[in-house]
Amino acid sequence: MTVTIFVPRDAAALALGAEKVAEAIAQEIAIRGLDAKIVRNGSRGMFWLEPLVEVRTKEGRIAYGPVKSGDVKGLFDAGFLEGGQHALHLGPTKDIPFLRQQTRLTFSRCGVTDPLSLDDYRQYQGLKGLENAIAMTQAQIVAQVTDSGLRGRGGAGFPTGIKWKTVMDAAGPQKYIVCNADEGDSATFADRMIMEGDPFVLIEGMIIAGIATGATKGYVYTRSEYPHAIATMTKAVEIARAAGILGPSVMGSAHAFDMEIRSGAGAYVCGEETSLLNSLEGKRGIVRAKPPLPALQGFLGRPTVVNNVISLASVPVIMDRGAAFYRDFGMGRSRGTIPIQIAGNVKYGGLYETAFGLSLGEIVDHIGGGTATGRPVKAVQVGGPLGAYFPCALFDTPFDYEAFAARDGLIGHAGITVFDDSADMLKQARFAMEFCAIESCGKCTPCRIGSTRGVETADKIKQGIEPEKNKALLADLCNTMKFGSLCALGGFTPYPVMSAMNHFPEDFSPAPLIEAAE
């Protein structure tokens, strides 16, 4: 019987040497004349264990990691194909605590299946949601997504069903589904992991969105910095089209839907939906004024659903298992699960999918294991470079859209960056302003000019030049940017700046001058 060995082809695993590991394993199989094959899967999301190599045995999948190419010969000598003991032996993959404690719905197949095998996808409940959707009316699909409580996982948290209903009800000869895969926030990699590790779930979600709203064409807009995701998604679309899942008759139904992959040039502002649409149309990526909303006048002026990868990838499980099943997870108005991405100065960095409601402290200290340096945690930034810095005093905050908003924070794309006590929060506030100045599309004055003045003002505070006056000026700039900017780039930059000032005032006080001895 052929033994299956799993070696990730996820970008994070490749960065840590997975390609060399796969080559070494293939070489050992050939030299020893063994009956074994290698499957290049996605990542399980435990990056401190990458490359994580698994072998399918009678007892289930056994994990080893982190594996280097130099370890491979020893693994085979130790009976690796039978799950033999070795220094890198981690036991059954499903029993690794970081993985075992998760609630994997959207990521249930990621790292489990061959990403480009439709047979694998079907074997693990793939296409069940689409089959159900085909048998339903548009209104029934939209109602199920609405009832599930699914909100936009890209950061805004807008109810997905309401957006779909707006497009469904809009008149137009052509409608579009646009997937915002321009994942540009620091500490975020969930979109990339799905596209590389389970591309068919995104395709399935987009088709369901198309059937629900009457859209027959879709686009995935992602970053040129994601070559592996682009290659995997492109191949998956070809496979789905050849299998009749995409095309003029979706799975033999009366519904038509096709899609293609487009890549941008890496402008952060193109993560904002209207800038993205301009870029997708071949124009400069600058923000559009709203109204009109993209749902009514989006891509090429037609009704358009713009959803994030995780929003769309969560739809198949809702359509398969029902709105009540999905809504049962979470708290308040934050329903379902959220893939939390833990990064920065942290011991156990990776992706952790769980129901909304865990406290920030549980995520950082229990799941993330505290800092990698072993020093005390000083601050945690949640929501990318535009997210607020939370001190340990706010670690009781539950991971929930409204709970974070109540404490002047935002969940965003659920990326968490951990900092230890060596971090300079004035420097971090300055970085936020500098980042905004560099990435601004330049259309609105508060963002374009306010961020530049913000950098100058932070520098004056650092130099001890009229610190109180300049702190007041920095706060005033933030207020102008927050309420005067056209989009979230300028509007959210005040979050990291003001949270740094409010929670870490000691870092904004210049060191006292030491007078020269007389």
Image (tube, grey):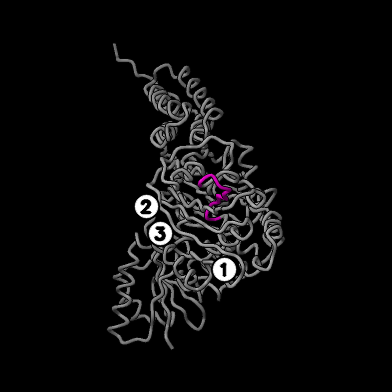
Image marks 3 and 2: residues in contact by CB distance under 8 Å = no
Quarter of the image with the N terminus is bottom left
Residue 187 on image: x %, y %? 45, 49
Tell me which label, 3 or 2, sits earlier in the chain.
Answer: 2
- Disc 3 designates what residue? 230
Q: Secondary structure at mark 3?
A: helix
- Disc 1 designates what residue? 250
Horizontal side of 322 relative to 488 (left or right) equals: right
Label 1, residues with CA under 10 Å away: few <14, some 14-19, many ≥20: many
Tell me the residue at 63%/50% (across/down): 167
Tell me the residue at 44%/52% (across/down): 222
Front-lying residue, 265 or 187: 265
Residue 247 on image: x %, y %? 52, 66
> Label 1 sits on what residue type?
Val
Tell me which label, 1 or 3, sits earlier in the chain.
Answer: 3
Tell me the residue at 57%/61% (across/down): 205
Q: CA distance from mark 3 to mark 2?
A: 9 Å
Q: Is residue 308 magenta?
A: yes
Horizontal side of 468 relative to 207 (left or right) equals: left
Q: CA distance from mark 1 to mark 3?
A: 23 Å
- Disc 2 designates what residue? 225
> What's the magenta region?
300-310
Image marks 1 and 3: residues in contact by CB distance under 8 Å = no
Q: 214 above or below 431? A: below
Residue 84 on image: x %, y %? 42, 80
Q: Disc 1 or disc 3, which is closer to the eye?
A: 1
Q: Disc 1 or disc 2, which is closer to the eye?
A: 1
> Label 2 sits on what residue type?
Glu
> Label 3 sits on what residue type?
Ile
Label 3, residues with CA under 10 Å away: few <14, some 14-19, many ≥20: many
Q: Disc 3 or disc 2, which is closer to the eye?
A: 3
